[in-house]
Amino acid sequence: MGTGKLTISIDLELAWGVWDILSAADLQMAETSERPICAALIDLFDRHQVRATWAIVAALLDKSAAIGRPGKEACWYAPDIIERVVNSRVAHELGTHSGRHVYFNKISESEAGEDLAFAEAMHRANGFSFKSMVFPRNAVAHLGVLARHDLKTFRGPDAGWVRRAGRAGRRAAQVANYADKFFPVPPSPVTAKDRGDLIDIPGSMLLMGRNGPRRFVLPQVTRAKLYMGLERARHTEGIFQLWFHPSNFYYRRDEQLATLSWFLEHAANEASRGRIEICTMESYAARAMTDDVSQRETSI
């Protein structure tokens, strides 16, 4: 039996993530909660020696982008958080979550190009790689623009039965979504797919927030889903891609962090036994390049 793979991707956005539906509560949480949560997440990854892909909104590195925005500057400008990721003991990947959290399915190709040009410039200016993309709101579009900016991978929409149920209409999607969250339904393993010059790594599971009705989801259910997702990836030699935002820890923070810590400890143990491999998003591009070179050499 081969090994499965675990990939964790994090959408780091602060107030940029809700710029179009912003509330006073959003600003308060971005200002007061995001930094201690990010610090706790980085500490957990360090403790368990697990790497992740942090997909950052590039405007978080541009102080001028915060000018005129509501609330405190700290809601929109956060080089301190990103510096802490870079200086952690674990070598994380810094991917992009676009320049200013625009929705690629609602903008033109030229607008998408302008946004990615800004994001790439911010990454290059800070010495960060620019290989992986997480689309805001998972709205996948303009893949050709990504390729022209030398991006190599992106996170596709979550795989599994909930997505399939959504094809039956909005009501079916809502019912499926709640059933998936409240019951220990195992997440689907995924495979990395070639999409022209890009590699699509679909999501497997969102570690959801615990506000509203979701606060009634038992932690045992979430842990069961995490365990089964990794097990299914191992048995199928597939990928379990877990993703979340730091804002998913705003409510019931300690409980959420305890759940993630439990999972990271389990994943690290499985990795130490050679049963899974922990991969960043960009590692799939490096693997594809190596495989391609090997195939060409074999054919000579």
Image: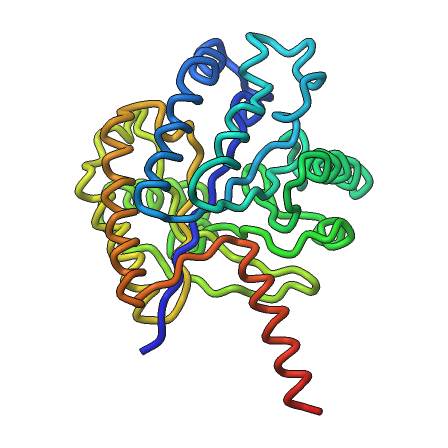
Q: Residue at x 72, y 35 (%)?
A: 125
Q: Residue at x 53, y 54 (%)?
A: 281
Residue 35: quarter of image: top left
Q: Is residue 17 above or below residue 73?
A: below
Residue 66, percent from left and from top:
65, 15
Q: Quarter of the image containing the C terminus?
A: bottom right
Q: Is residue 234 above or below residue 182?
A: below
Viewer-nearest residue: 147 or 278 = 278
Q: Is residue 124 left or right of residue 89?
A: right
Q: Residue at x 21, y 50 (%)?
A: 224
Q: Is residue 299 above or below residue 126?
A: below
How many callouts does the rendering have?
0
Q: Is residue 77 above or below residue 266?
A: above
Q: Residue furthest right?
A: 110
Residue 157, percent from left and from top:
51, 50
Q: Residue furthest bottom?
A: 300
Viewer-nearest residue: 284 or 202 = 284
Residue 239, percent from left and from top:
41, 61
The colour scheme used here is rainbow
Residue 34: quarter of image: top left
Q: Quarter of the image containing the N terminus?
A: bottom left
Q: Is residue 51 left or right of residue 152?
A: left
Residue 2, percent from left and from top:
35, 75
Q: Residue at x 57, y 35 (%)?
A: 56
